[in-house]
Every structure is written in C-alpha cells, then in structure tokens.
Image (spheres, rainbow, N blue to C red):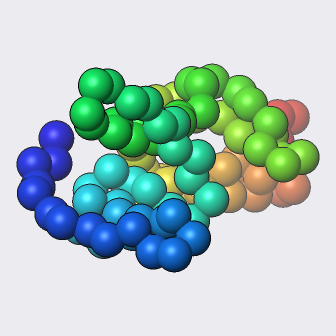
Amino acid sequence: MVFMNATVEIDKAGRIVVPKKVRDALGLNAGTQVELEVQEDAVVLRAKRQPKGLWNDRGLWVYDAGVPITTDEVQRWMDELRERRMRFVSGESLEP
C-alpha cells in the first residue's frame, strides 16, 4: 500500500495529475480506467482492474493469473518452450 500525501492542482479542463510515485507503485499507466467515487467531502479514485483469468483487451486475448511473474520466470518458460519445439522438430517428441 502506498502512503503519500500530495497536493495537486485541477487544470482548466478539470484534470489532475496523479504523481509518478503513486502511478508507479499502483501500476497505473496511460489508458488505465479509474473509477471515481464521492464520499461526503472526499473524492476517491480507484483503478478499475480487469478480471482475473482470460479476457479480451482490444481484440487480443490476455490471461492474467493474478500473480506477478518475474522476468526470470518468463525466460524459463521461453527456454522450455524452445526446447520442446526443438525436440519436436528433430523427431524426438510427438508433442510440440
């Protein structure tokens, strides 16, 4: 959880800028949808998260297991896939 106090200014168009430290900590990027909720005299912004599992993002199917993965894990998966394909191509295995 990010704990940060900041003062931001509303521009002429009614926009505010979420500080970079907060965006980075919460994984907010350009295009992230944000839900706005008014609670008495406060405004609560909440990132609208996609559901876990398989979902369609602008025509591309994406699977989110809900658990962040490291680049080492991705590299290991790619190496395993490459090895399986090489065995398949060389005739060692019937499974790609």
Front in this rendered view, residue 71 or 91: 71
Extreme residue toward the bottom, this view: 12
Front in this rendered view, residue 95 or 73: 73
Height in image: 60 above or below 89?
above
Height in image: 27 above or below 39?
below
- Residue 13 appearing in the image: yes
Q: In the rendered view of the protein, which quadrant contains the N terminus? A: top left
Q: Say which residue appears at 35% left-offset and 64% top-offset.
A: 18
Q: Say which residue appears at 58% left-offset and 46% top-offset.
A: 33
Residue 82 position in % (x across, y down): 68, 58
Height in image: 7 above or below 64?
below
- Residue 88 appearing in the image: no
Q: Say which residue appears at 86% left-offset and 34% top-offset.
A: 94
Residue 28 position in % (x across, y down): 44, 56
Height in image: 43 above or below 54?
below
Q: In the rendered view of the protein, which quadrant contains the C terminus? A: top right
- Report which quarter residue 62 is drawn in: top right
Front in this rendered view, residue 7 or 21: 7
Left or right: 55 in relation to 23: right
Left or right: 40 in relation to 79: left
- Report which quarter residue 13 is drawn in: bottom right
Q: Say which residue appears at 10% left-offset and 48% top-offset.
A: 3
